[in-house]
Image (cartoon, rainbow, N blue to C red):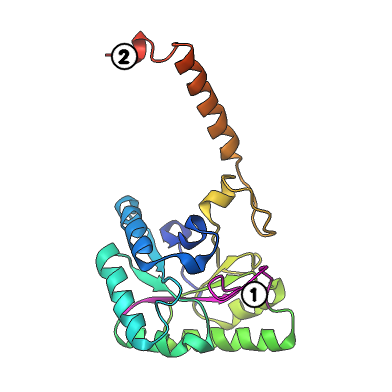
Amino acid sequence: MPKRIDLKLFVLLLIQRILHSSTRKVTLTEMINHSKSVRLGVKKSLMVVDMPYKTYDTNVSALKNAKKIIKETKCDAVKLEGGKKIIKQVKFLMKNKIPVMGHLGLLPQSTKGKFKSKGKTSREIKQLISDALSLQREGVFAIVLECVKSSVAKQITKSLSIPTIGIGSSVFCDGQVLVTDDLLGLNQTKIKFVKRFLNLKKHINIGLRKFSSEVKSKKYPSKKHSY
C-alpha cells in the first residue's frame, strides 16, 4: 500500500528558526502564542508544532508540555527532534494518545556551530536507519529528514511505511518542507538546500520606498484614498 500524504494538508510550524539566531532560545510560551495565530488561519491543513529545546527531556516534562501545546493551540500533533535519545519520551507520548512527528538527520536544537549534512559515514547511516525504524515502531505518523544524504534518505524512505518529509534531503522523500521566509526570499540565507522561489524582499522594499515618497510629496493619500 502506498504511503498517504497530501502536501496541501500539511503545515509544519518552524517558528524556532525565524524568531531567534538559535533554536535553543525559543520558549514554550513563544511557540504557543505564535501557534495560536497560525491556528486561526488553518482551515484544512494538519498542523504540527515543534516542541522547543529542553521541553521534552523527561517523560513527565514531555507529556506536560505536549498537552499544554495541544490544549492551548489546538494543533494536531507535536514534533520532537532525535532518535534513540528521545525514544522513551515518544513512546510515553504515544501511550498517552499524543500524536507525534519525528525528526532525524540534522537536529537544530542539538547542533552547535556550523550545520552539516548527515549520513556520511557507515556509522551515521546505520544509526539513522535504526532511529527511523524505532520511531516508526513507537507510532510516529511521519518523520522529517533534515540534511540527510540523498542515498540515505532514499534508503530510509523505502524502509518505512510512514511518510518522510525532506528538508535538504533530496527528492526521494515523500514530501518536502521549507521555511516560508527562505523560499520567498525574505532571508538572505546561504544554506545549500534553500531555493529562493521569489525575491519578495525586493518587492517589499520597492513598495515601501514608493509609499514613503508619496507621503513626503503629499501625493498620498489623494482624494481617492480619503474620506
Q: Where is residue 194 in the image (x, y as percent from the top left)?
A: 64, 55
Q: In the drawing, what numbered circle is on residue 226? A: 2
Q: Residue at x 66, y 68 (%)?
A: 115
Q: Nearer the viewer, residue 135 or 210?
A: 210
Residue 226 placement, left or right of 90: left
Main secondary-structure element of the magenta-colored stretch: loop
- Relative to 129, residue 214 above or below: above
Q: Where is residue 62 in the image (x, y as percent from the top left)?
A: 36, 81
Q: In the rendered structure, which amino acid carries the disc numbered 2?
A: Ser
Q: Which residue is identified by label 1?
A: 153
Q: Which of 155 and 103 is in front in this view?
A: 103
- Boundaries of the magenta span: 98-118
Q: What element carries label 1?
A: helix
Q: Residue at x 35, y 11 (%)?
A: 224
Q: In the rendered structure, which amino acid carries the disc numbered 1?
A: Ala
Q: How crowded is mark 1: few (under 14 residues within 10 Å), some or many (20 or more)?
A: many
